[in-house]
Amino acid sequence: GPKVLQIPSHQIIDMGQMVTLNCDPVSNHLYFYWYKQILGQQMEFLVNFYNGKVMEKSKLFKDQFSVERPDGSYFTLKIQPTALEDSAVYFCASSFSGANTGQLYFGEGSKLTVL
Amino acid sequence: QQQVRQSPQSLTVWEGETTILNCSYEDSTFDYFPWYRQFPGKSPALLIAISLVSNKKEDGRFTIFFNKREKKLSLHITDSQPGDSATYFCAASKAGNTRKLIFGLGTTLQVQP
């Protein structure tokens, strides 16, 4: 089936550093999402992105977070500076038609550990 | 406050039994309810989904029963197999230009051989 690729799979950084999580969505998909999952709990919506713009973001999407997809390349989540509470697994997801079926394809996650 | 609630939190059944996972929601504007399955260390994957126009959706051993009046859903897994052991997330979304999914906390299922 369609694959969403995430790089890196695991990153360990010191608090205060910057981190960029990369996502290669399914090629013909138009809607892109980031979710945050802590310790195997539920996935919580962070942000979604369409046509080069943030469409909606949650209160978890702090000012230190930013997303972009320059020139149709990776869809990235940048955290600058990082905080201890940012430690989590971040899942990227993409959807062809966000307004219709709601079917999201998820990557395998990027585990971020902030020390 | 959880917009999507799931119960039980965890469940152990024997191989061959029918597993029943429960989900409920409050927001009456939700109109699409997918169930995602996540194996440890893996990405969640869509298992089966139902919309407001249906009361039941079946796909092989997996069936969603939907009580719209009570805003409750249940996922039934017949002839449960050890390979079904995973965490099952109920999710909900509403019409709009983002179609974000709101996930429940999940039910962790263990099927014993």
Image (spheres, rainbow, N blue to C red):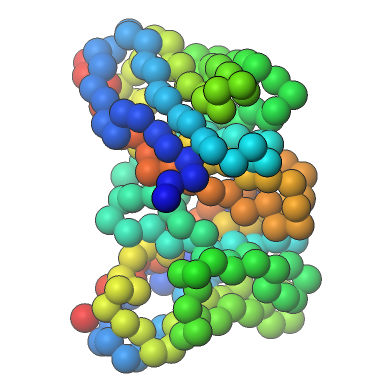
Where's residue A43, x and y in %?
A: 43, 53
Q: In which quarter of the image is residue A37?
A: bottom left
| Position of residue B5 in the picture relative to residue A56 (left or right) | left
Residues B34 and B95: in front is: B95
Where's residue B2, x and y in %?
A: 43, 47
- Residue B50 visible in the current orientation: yes
Residues B25 and A48: in front is: B25
- Residue A27 visible in the current orientation: no
**Where, quadrant-wise, is the C terminus of chain A in this rendering?**
bottom left
Q: Which residue is drawn at 58% across and 19% down?
A: B67
Q: Which residue is drawn at 34% across and 91% down?
A: A17
Residues A38 and B55: in front is: B55
**Where, quadrant-wise, is the N terminus of chain A in this rendering?**
top right
Rendered view: A46 above or below A84: above
| Position of residue B32 in the picture relative to residue B24 (left or right) | right
Rendered view: A53 above or below A17: above
Residues B95 and B70: in front is: B70
Q: Which residue is drawn at 59% across and 41% down?
A: B27
Counting every numbered tag in the picture gives 0
| Position of residue A60 in the picture relative to residue B16 (left or right) | right
Where's residue A91, x and y in %?
A: 47, 60
Rendered view: B74 above or below B104: above
Where's residue B22, x and y in %?
A: 42, 25
